[in-house]
Image (tube, rainbow, N blue to C red):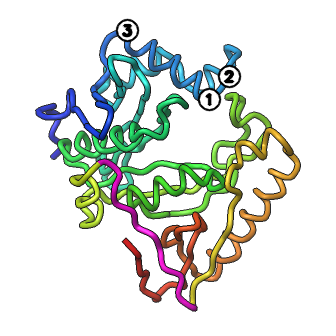
Amino acid sequence: MLHTGSAVTDQVRHAAPGWDADVEMLRTAGQLEAAAQLLWNVWGARTEAERTEVISTSLLRTLFHTGNYVAGAYVHGELVGCAVGLFGSLASNGRPDHLHSSIAGVVRAKSNRGVGYAMKRHQRQWALERGLKSIRWTFDPLVSRNAYFNLCKLGATVASYETDYYGKLKDGVNNGQDTDRLLVNWDLCDNWVERAMTGELGQKRRHALTPAESEVIEIPDDIAQLREDDPLRAEVERDKVREHFRSLLSRDYRVVGMDKGKNYVLLPVGVEAGYDE
């Protein structure tokens, strides 16, 4: 049975050298409006249609009032990050068995200061309090920074490669692009995850080793910049990575993580993964 209390995570402080981040559930109309504005800015959504595609303030209010996850991160009183999730179910009885993290964003100036990690740690605690053992979300496989964060820093595992997962979006950042995504599952009770979440903020890394049986998929260092400078080449990169994933997954390879060079590492089913921590 799900526990619906909020004993611990209404407000949690996560400290790292040089800064403090307060992560808390967002409740008031002003907080939710500020969260929507932050996500619009992160996504570069300028028009009303683009903003609605990202998220609306009315949806944020509905999610909060129905008991879902809507949290913000503050640094010195300034909202610098927001994460939104909702209960999901893969169970045959339809009961919620995981949290689906729908959208999360951190303002660019704070993006490399551990705010994303602090929000994920808060989200993990919130889910565990409600009897959920995993969190699932999607990300663009070409965005190396996000991939490294999800696989090497958080220890999430890839469940599937989804082609054009959202269809065509008009949200600012994804305008006119195919929306291929990796769907990941974060096992909240995994031994490595537990150790990573209780130590120094973001200090642990899990890099996949590349034995002889492994295959490696390389991605651009900065796909966002490439999309600005050369959109056609960026699409060529997407097609190349898509076909590489499809080919390997069809041959019963699985994604086991990333190496230190931020390349995806895949192994055949039956070959045990090894990691350099």
| x then y, percent, for residue 114 | 39, 41
Type of amino acid under label 1 = Trp
Compared with 105, 269 (above or below) is below
- Asked whether, in this view, residue 116 is left or right of residue 187, the answer is right
Compared with 205, 178 (above or below) is above
Residue furthest to the bottom: 212
Q: Which mark is residue 50?
A: 2
Badge 3 element? helix
Q: Residues within 10 Å of mark 2 (few under 14, many from 20)?
A: many
Q: CA distance from mark 1 to mark 3?
A: 21 Å
Q: Is residue 14 visible?
A: yes
Q: Which residue carries the number 3 mark?
A: 29
Q: CA distance from mark 1 to mark 2?
A: 9 Å
| x then y, percent, for residue 249 | 62, 74
Question: Residue at left 72%, top 63%?
Answer: 242
Q: Is residue 23 visible?
A: no
User: Is mark 1 in CB contact (under 8 Å) with mark 2?
Assistant: yes
Badge 2 element? helix
Type of amino acid under label 2 = Glu
Q: Which residues are magenta?
A: 201-212
Q: Nearer the viewer, residue 115 or 33?
A: 115
Label total for image: 3
Q: Which residue carries the number 1 mark?
A: 43
